[in-house]
Amino acid sequence: MKIGIVGYKGRMGKEIKDLFEEKNHEFVWGYDKDGEYFQEKPQLIIDFSLPEVFEKTEDYVKKFKVPLIIGTTGLQDEQIEALKTLSKDVPVVQSYNFSIGIQLFLKMADLLKDKIYGWDVEIVETHHRFKKDKPSGTAKMIKESLDKDVPISSLRLGNVAGDHVLYMANLGEVLSISHRALSRRAFAEGVLKSAEFVINKKNGYFTFTDVI
Ligand SMILES: NC(=O)c1ccc[n+]([C@@H]2O[C@H](COP(=O)([O-])OP(=O)(O)OC[C@H]3O[C@@H](n4cnc5c(N)ncnc54)[C@H](O)[C@@H]3O)[C@@H](O)[C@H]2O)c1
Ligand SMILES: O=C(O)C1=N[C@H](C(=O)O)CCC1
């Protein structure tokens, strides 16, 4: 595959570029703060940047008419709506977490959500000190999966790649589900799976749950 990356100079951009190149795919296009890198038209665009870059990504996806995989967190509701509109013309995969473990976490939360009536439920997420958004996109996904307004606590510590814990307690016991990303590689591998899933599709809106 010949890929393009929005945010190619960032932590995730570099991790994704390295993984795809290891697997003999080619990085041919990029967009970052200092502008465009152009070698040739990409077959696919991957966006790991910031919500304020979204309109630019949308323009490039329309210009190249290629699939989009977007992992950028903190998107506004209107931007998610814009992705759904875009997906009528090109395939789009959107997720705030591309690790397999978080998909399993969400399945467990879904299994438990009707069985913890009257329990205290809280989410704690920990990420590196450079992370701009709070709470994490993943914590928002976990909260949404519970269909319940639960508190989220956010810690910003050192170089943590991504920890999420869902605590559930009654007066006699505490149950928790936890996930720790050991490095950004786990997310990049999910992006590669998504690229293989989406590359030959014509259009449609997908999440990482559809991919695995
Ligand atoms: N979905 C997931 O699995 C997942 C995993 C990790 C990170 N993320 C998200 O991915 C995003 C990027 O994370 P990161 O740690 O790589 O951040 P980062 O800050 O290292 O990278 C962001 C990149 O975007 C570029 N950028 C910033 N403003 C720009 C502008 N106006 N125009 C063009 N480029 C601009 C930066 O220069 C940088 O290279 C964040 O939203 C983060 O929450 C999602
Ligand atoms: O490093 C980040 O930033 C991460 N952001 C995602 C989130 O906000 O949920 C996923 C984990 C890493």
Image: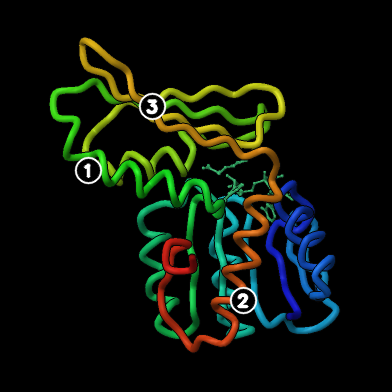
Point out which mark residue 147 bears: 1
Q: Amino acid at mark 2?
A: Glu
- Residue at 20% over, 22% down: 119
Q: Is residue 194 or residue 104 the one in the foreground? A: 104
| Of pointers 3 and 1, the one earlier in the residue sequence | 1
Q: Quadrant of residue 143?
A: top left
The N terminus lies in quadrant: bottom right
- Amino acid carrying mark 3 in the image: Ser
Q: Is residue 29 above or below residue 89?
A: above
Q: Is residue 29 left or right of residue 75?
A: right
Asked which secondary structure carries label 2, the reply is helix
Spatial CA span between label 3 and label 1: 18 Å
**Label for residue 36?**
none
Q: Amino acid at mark 1?
A: Asp
Residue at x 38% of width, y 47% of height:
106
Query: Which residue is farthest front?
Result: 172
Around disc 1, counting alpha carbons within 10 Å, would you say few (fewer than 14), some (14 to 19), or many (20 or more)?
few
**Quadrant field for ligand 2:** top right
Looking at marks 2 and 1 on the same chain, the residue that comes earlier in the sequence is marked by 1
Indicate the position of residue 125 as horizontal and vertical percent values.
49, 29
Label 3 crowd bin: few (<14), some (14–19), many (20+), radius 10 Å: few
Q: Position of residue 46 (x, y in %)?
A: 64, 66
Find residue 77 and report its horizontal and vertical position in percent: 36, 54
Which is more toward the observer, 161 or 73?
Answer: 161
Could you tell which of marks 2 and 3 lies nearer the N-terminus? Answer: 3
| Residue bearing mark 2 | 196
| Residue 176's disc number | 3
Of tags 2 and 3, which is closer to the observer? 3
Q: CA separation, marks 2 and 1?
A: 31 Å
| Crowding near the residue tagged with mark 2, few <14, some 14–19, many ≥20 C-alpha atoms within 10 Å | few
Question: Which of the 4 image quarters holds residue 56?
Answer: bottom right
Label 2 – label 3 distance at C-alpha: 33 Å
